[in-house]
Amino acid sequence: MTRTKSCPKDILGLHGLDGRTIIAILDEAVALRDDFRRCGKPLDILANRTVCLLFFEPSTRTMNAFAQAARNLSADVLSVAAGETSSISKGETLLDTARNLEAIGADRFVVRHGSSGAPHRLAPLLRAGVLNAGDGRHEHPSQALLDMFTLRERFGRLDGLHVGIVGDVLHSRVARSNVWGLVACGARVTLVAPPAWMPPGAESLGAEVSHDLDAVLPGLDAVMALRIQKERLGGDPGPTTSQYAARYQVNAERLRRAKDSCVVLHPGPINRGVELTSDVADGPRSLILRQVTNGVFVRQACLARCIRGLDKGLDEGLDEGRAS
Ligand code: CP
């Protein structure tokens, strides 16, 4: 089992990370999961460290999985969310908020923000490490890592798998991080979306592109349905729910075309009856709750990796693992 040795203080995205580095993070997630199970109590890797969850957008899975991961590694956890309970509602900036929390003792921030690039702008201005928990429509690296962890757990490899990512690709940070991560690890990825929800030049991400799920489905090892992000659709809503479901919904009838071994993923939260039918979401092909469980293990590895980056100093190693 490979454990990462030298690490950057931040994990901001998977774009540009090489496959070797991603596999090392997944291996570390396995090792920490097994250590925690063997030990039967929190590991002391983050003892006397403070992880601050800084969420400017709603979250159930990511925020709580990071909190659980931090507790499993003996960290203290602070939690600040946009809304009436924090001074963010009084207009305090992201940087001022983070600097004040750093002054309180936070040495690791898990940041979700509606603005693409917000964690990237914050990270160089802080001594603390920054983990991107989803920025606008840009990246969601820990989600893609847990998706890859789950696929590797099921198939024993990522190299050579064919993964279809289906739905609102245009607004999806999950899709972007998964394309970059999966392709770096040797998987083939096909993005499938209605024309209105396929970003222009999507092939440049490294994936193949299709508007026809029924044509692509028979060749897939895994189909990942994306959430339709109503909050990001803006003035151009694209297809109606019924138009979308008719061509892109992952349902039992459509899955008759798929291999017996084809599995179904979804990052959550699910719009039941839209992207997926309930019989598929809760059925034998579904790995959706497995993804959520694995999210704790992957985030343990992300937090542990960043603490080693912090201990090395601010700048040293920041580019470690970047493909040349
Ligand atoms: N997949 C995901 O990011 O879920 P949350 O919005 O609940 O964190």
Image: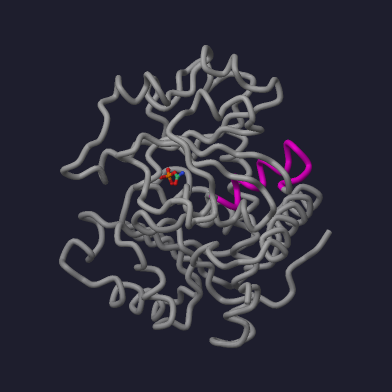
Residues 2 and 35: in front is 2
- Taking the image as shown, residue 191 lies to the left or right of residue 162, namely left
The part of the chain drawn in magenta is: 144-158
- Which residue is rendered at x = 41% and y = 72% of the image? 120
Give x and y (percent) for residue 308: 65, 76
User: Is residue 8 positioned above or below 257 on the image?
Assistant: below
Outermost residue, right side: 1
Residue 249 at x, y percent in the picture: 43, 23
| Residue 16, image x, y percentages | 56, 67
Up the image or down, 126 lies above or below 118; here it is: below
The answer to whether 54 is drawn above or below residue 212 in the figure is below
Magenta region's main secondary structure?
helix
Q: In the shown orientation, is residue 30 left or right of residue 227?
A: right
Q: Quadrant of the C terminus?
A: bottom right
User: Which image quarter: residue 114?
Assistant: bottom left
| Residue at horizontal 48 percent and vertical 52 percent from the top | 203
Indicate whether residue 63 is drawn in magenta: no
Q: In which quadrant will I find the N terminus?
A: bottom right
Q: Which residue is painted at 59% across and 54% down in the image? A: 69
Q: How is the image coloured?
A: one colour
Q: Is residue 68 above or below residue 242?
A: below
- The percent position of residue 263, horizontal first and vertical second, equals 63, 29
**Residue that appears at 54% across and 41% down:** 190
Q: Quadrant of ligand 1?
A: top left
Q: Check residue 156 for magenta coloring.
A: yes
Front residue of this view, candidates 105 and 258: 258
* 109 relative position to 241: left or right: right
The image quadrant that residue 43 belongs to is bottom right
**In this view of the protein, which residue sits in the foreground, 166 or 29?**
166
Judge from the rendering whether residue 65 lies leftward or rightward of residue 36; answer left or right. left
